[in-house]
Amino acid sequence: MLDTGSAVSILPEDIYLKYFAKDPLVAPALRLVSYLKDPIPVLGCLQVTVQFESNTAKCDFYIVNNGTAILGRDLFAALNLQLVDSCITTAPVPPSQPVSKISPQNNTPLGCAKNFVHKVKLRPDVKPVRQKLRRLPYSIRETVSQELKKLVEQDVIEKSESSEWVSPIVVTMKKTGGIRLCVDLREPNKAVVIDNHPLPHIEEIFSELRGAKFFSTLDLQSAYHQVLLHEESRDLTAFITHDAPSCFQRLMSSILHDIPGVQCYLDDIIVYAPTLDSHDKYLKKVLKRIDSAGLKLNHSKCHSRQTQLSFLGHIISQNGLLPDPDHVNAVTQAPTPSDFQTLRAFLGLTSWYSKFIPNNASVVEPLRALLRGTSSLVWSETAQHSFETVKQLIVNSPALALFDPVLPTMVTTDASDYGIGAVLTQIHADQLEKTVAFASRTLTEAERKYSTVEKEALACVWATEKWRTYLWGREFTLCTDHSPLTTLLTTKGLGRAGMRIARWSARLLNFNYKIQYKPGLKNVTADCLSRLPLPAATDTLEEDIEVVALTDDILSSTVTAADFKQACLTCPVQEKLRDILQSKWPNSEKKVSPDLQPYYRIRHELSLVDDYVVRGSHRLLVPETLREKFIQLAHESHQGIVRTKQRLRELYWWPAMDADVVTAIHSCVTCQNHDKTAITHTPPLQPVPFPDSAWEKLAIDIVGPFTDATIDCRFAITLIDYYSKWPEIAFVSHITSATVITFLSTVFSREGNPKELISDNGPQFVSSEFEFFLRERNIVHRKSSVYYPQANGEIERFNRSLKEALQTANLTGKSWKAFTTEFLHNYRATCHATTQASPAELLHGRQMRTKLHVADIKFPQDALATKSSTADIVKRQQAKCKAYTDRKPGAREVHFQPGSLVRVKKPGLLKQGQSKFTTPLEVRRQRGPYTYELSDGRIWNASRLAPVRHDLAEVPFDEGHIPTPDITCDRPEQSEPIRRPERNRKQPAWTKDYVM
């Protein structure tokens, strides 16, 4: 890109890597900033040779992260380049010639305002909101994707990596069949600081237009998309925020401020003049200025050389200003009342404007007389004359005022069984509410079948879009006498509004409104207009999207759209719902039949679309006969409860649907035999009882193999005293029961035999040889639960310290045996965190001398006091540890009754697709606080057991069983034969020695 405004030439990093990757970068000599004074990060500077025709020069290119390659002024000077301007010639335009013939054309699909960047100011006290995605119908997803791709190609939108503000996209259908993409910015708009740039006063505009004979109106193509949004404001997702109109007014004023015969009001541009020559002269200047500013017109909506103009509710011509007759047609053309109800509504309207009607009581007396003493309405010529007179007095009264953009604006709506009405009013300085326009129309045959809430919502949307000229770009109040709409037409009603109301609410996203409840007694004007609507209904809203088209895409072949529709039509509950949705809900839940009471609390979320009952914007009510089948369809791949619920919630609903899903999945045999339904819980920590004295209870374990160690250090046998925390370590080349016995014999010969020894279930510790060794010395052998190393946590914690020490030995280059001797010396002499004393002091009753003992001082010790205080300290430490551990997620009391079924979580790494749990096993008895003996004869900790539902207790299972553990995962196989029991025993004697 050629840019004479850039002092240097720039290359993006991707071009540098593609063509100049071998050339080194040098430090840049300059610091670059954008035209907004924002710093531009520079990766480095590259000097290359550039040739243009016969000119060659060496030029510096600054390498940046991304962007467009720019040839700056330095390159122009080095290569002696010159830009040649082209001249645009114009010619007189005949009255019938469209604006496009005299407008400078550019080939870009969409313009972009030059030298103007809009930055949205946010209130710091408002927290960003990340809204959830709203699902789109399948029938329009491809169209939406294409439209988004088009906007990306036009550089209107860009992909966002992350944003604190996330607003959902909303799609509305155009009358032409296309779609209009909107963004629901109601939440971000709450944080936007309003731009107070003044809008032109309506009286000033009308004053300038007086005397003009020729008019042209210009329309910018996607006006707001042509304004560049500041990078700091792009997280708001879209540009149309509260201050967008003021921003655009500022932009257009800066572009057209010095051209005569031009008035700009938001995105409306009016060119006017008393003569045709002057008009064309002004128009050409405006068109050229717009093109120079980088903006593009929508020529199909531009009109030139008009002799009259409709603007802000007025007809402007050389004859002056006239009110737009469309504003009062709803009153002047109101049909004659046909019953007492419509007559009372019209009299309510006259009472509302009575202060502005001279002799109101005498004028309306013939109408009031009709309400007295007769059972039927008899319309007379006197009544007709009074009726017409009152209508003319209302539309010509001071109660009607010109629209003023500065004044607070209100739109009040109402709906009857056959019509909708609305009134546009403004609050003036004297606090009087004056009418700007009336509107009404008759409902179509299809619209009369809408529910009450849908008719009221239709009135709101229809009136707002009808008066778009007045309402768009400014804040106004939308008043309704139907209180549910105060929620359903706001962000609070997301997901709760009916299908139609959800779409209509999306159409209101272009407007900045506050919805307000107005009691029916105060809503007399709109009420009257809705009961006396104009017969024409040419401006009805678009028809609804066919719901059946969606069901064919998502239903399995086992349930067709015809099956679903037939079930809905024959369902007694849905038949009642259809009747009540076409009429009106009772005002009390007690008046509703019991089968409809579950629907009463969400009655405002229900709607009727093509004989289907719909909750919210898209969820169909499933008849009772198909609910079980729909759960099976949603659960056909045996997804979990949450995913099955989510799949159904996307498209369907019925009362207690979640509970039905839970019940169905809990009864699914396949799922009960699957890992996802097997849930284990960690029981509360069960502290090991602290022994009464030193060397009473010991724990033993094996660490290894160490693959990077010498042959004589492949394994380590570790031993620790529960009371004193005194450790012992022996490195060996192989692990057998004999090796372990040799190690223990050496230690026991020095310190004596303990009362109790705790180990895991490794083959070295369960062999008959090892058991004989312990029985011979009267040592009780207790084994921890299968695959539950936490039960022997004392030795496991010491093993971690040993591994850390061995890592240190590797880092310092020392031999393992030598460093372990030093490690043991310091460990035994150091105060332990649990006992608050050193292992040597608690085991031998004295402190070990170390290199730190340089003063020879003896202190008296009370061994009994030390023993008592140690037990208290350990108990406090165990209590703190238990409280901390039990706070972790999943820790809870876990108990199983004898005879109940459980599944055991398999240990170690399993092959892909292999079940992580065994088939159900029966609980025989409880062996400890949280340990249980199962029907396989083994004892398990409760943390590895998952309960099986009682309703599936008789279901046969044929999955594989848990493997019998030969050895823990970090040990090799036994290097010598070991005797193991090969038959089941009723009650082996060693089982009574198991502990947690």
Image (spheres, grey):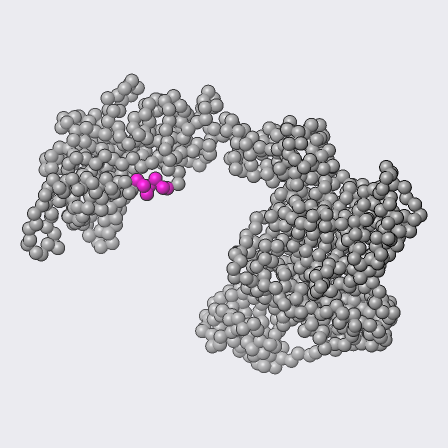
Residue 769 sits in which quadrant?
top left
Query: Foreground residue, 415 or 170?
Result: 415
Q: Where 661 sits versus 516, above or below?
A: above
Residue shown at the point (47%, 71%) measured from the top left: 44
Q: Residue at x 13, y 42 (%)?
A: 865
Looking at the rendering, which quadrant does residue 613 occupy? top right
The residue lying at 21 percent from left, 54 percent from top is 813
674 lies above or below 367 = above
Q: Relative to residue 594, is residue 102 drawn left or right? A: right
x and y percentages locating residue 472 in the rendered image? 70, 59
Q: Position of residue 886 (x, y in %)?
A: 34, 39
Quadrant of the rendered image containing residue 428:
bottom right
Q: Quadrant of the N terminus?
A: bottom right
Residue 54: within the magenta? no
Above or below, comparing residue 407 to residue 91 in the picture: above
Q: Is residue 623 above or below residue 121?
A: above
Classify residue 743 as left or right of residue 343: left
Residue 224 location in percent, x, y?
67, 63
Residue 176 in sight in this render = no
* Range covered by the magenta-colored residues: 882-888
Horizontal and vertical percent position of residue 366: 88, 48
Left or right: 413 as drawn, with respect to 959: right
